[in-house]
Amino acid sequence: MMKFGALFSSLFVAALCFGQKVDSFDMKVADYRLLLSRKVQAECGVNEAQRARLNKVADQEKAKIEPYLAQVQKEGRSQDSLRTDKTYLGMLDELRLRVLEQLSLPQLKRLRELTLQSIDIRGILNVTVADKIGMSAAQLKKVRDIFSAYVKASTAIIKDVNQGIASKYKNTKVQTQAEAKSLNDSMNRQRDEELKKHKPQFDKLEKETKRDIDAVLSAKQLAAYQALQGKPFNPK
């Protein structure tokens, strides 16, 4: 089991590889969180020596990041404040740089391809990707507006579900921490069950959004994006 899993779960990617000149596109787009999967590691050709180095990097960076996060919590700052925290963001930049130093250029390229496959058409919301396939500023704005509408509609469904669950327990009193945990677990289970009932709505929204975004792009642009995704990855 890779020890860097928990630390990597909320971070993003960029890097230099073995002192070679890195493709800036791959550097900006590849998401190393995918490396948490053993199947992705195998697809990218990550070997045991690289895995050991990744663990070492994670341990070293964790020793820097965790105390800072504890300080943030002690100061009563919210998680949202970290989005603009230069110190924290600098730590993430250092981490992602050191992580992808462990990959060769072909490995980084494959990781970028798998990243774009994993996020499907949403990849073109990234200005770096949009530029790469020749999208105009007007096209990028249009697809971002389409996706924003999708997020708004999806969020509204989730909000309704959350409010419905919360209303059932608004007068419930708990006396102990164990009771609070039990109540929270029960609410989460019911929330998950309710969201599953809305899966057809989510699927419909996603299908319509992809269709509308595809319509904004030319055939040439769509083909260019598909090429950036590389060979389909179908892990067994």
Image: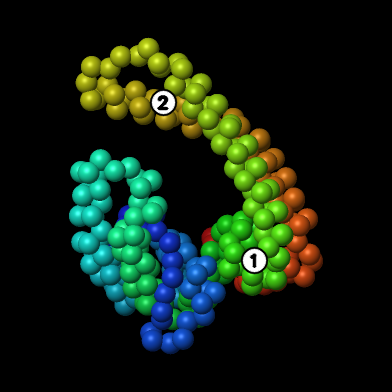
Compared with residue 213, is residue 204 higher up or lower down, i.e. above or below?
above
Residue type of the residue flagged with mark 1: Ala
Secondary structure at numbered mark 1: helix
Q: Position of residue 128 (x, y in %)?
A: 58, 68
In terms of sequence position, does the residue under pointer 1 or pointer 2 come before the other?
A: 1
> Is residue 5 visible in the rendered structure shown here?
no
Tag 2: amino acid: Met
Residue 23 location (% of width, % of height): 52, 80
Q: Residue at x 25, y 48 (%)?
A: 72
Seen at 20% across and 43% down, the residue is 74
The structure residue drawn at horizontal position 39% and vertical position 58%, both measured from the top left corner, is 11
Q: Is residue 32 left or right of residue 76?
A: right
Q: Is residue 82 above or below residue 41?
A: above
Helix, strand or loop under label 2: helix
Q: Residue pushed farthest top?
A: 171
What residue did someone put label 2 on?
A: 187
The local crowd at label 1, few if under 14, some if 14 to 19, many if 20 or more residues have their Cα within 10 Å, is: some
Q: Nearer the viewer, residue 196 or 174?
A: 174
Label 2: how many residues lie within 10 Å, few (<14), some (14-19) or many (20+)?
some
Q: Which mark is residue 203?
A: none
Instruction: Give the left or right position of residue 47, taking residue 211 as reference.
Output: left
In which quadrant is the N terminus drawn? Answer: bottom left
**Where residue 163 appears, x then y in whole percent?**
49, 23
Picture quadrant where residue 149 is located: top right
Judged from this view, the residue extending furthest toward the bottom is 20
Residue 200 sits in quarter: top right
Work out whether residue 61 can be spotted.
Answer: yes
According to the picture, the residue beneath numbered tag 1 turns out to be 130
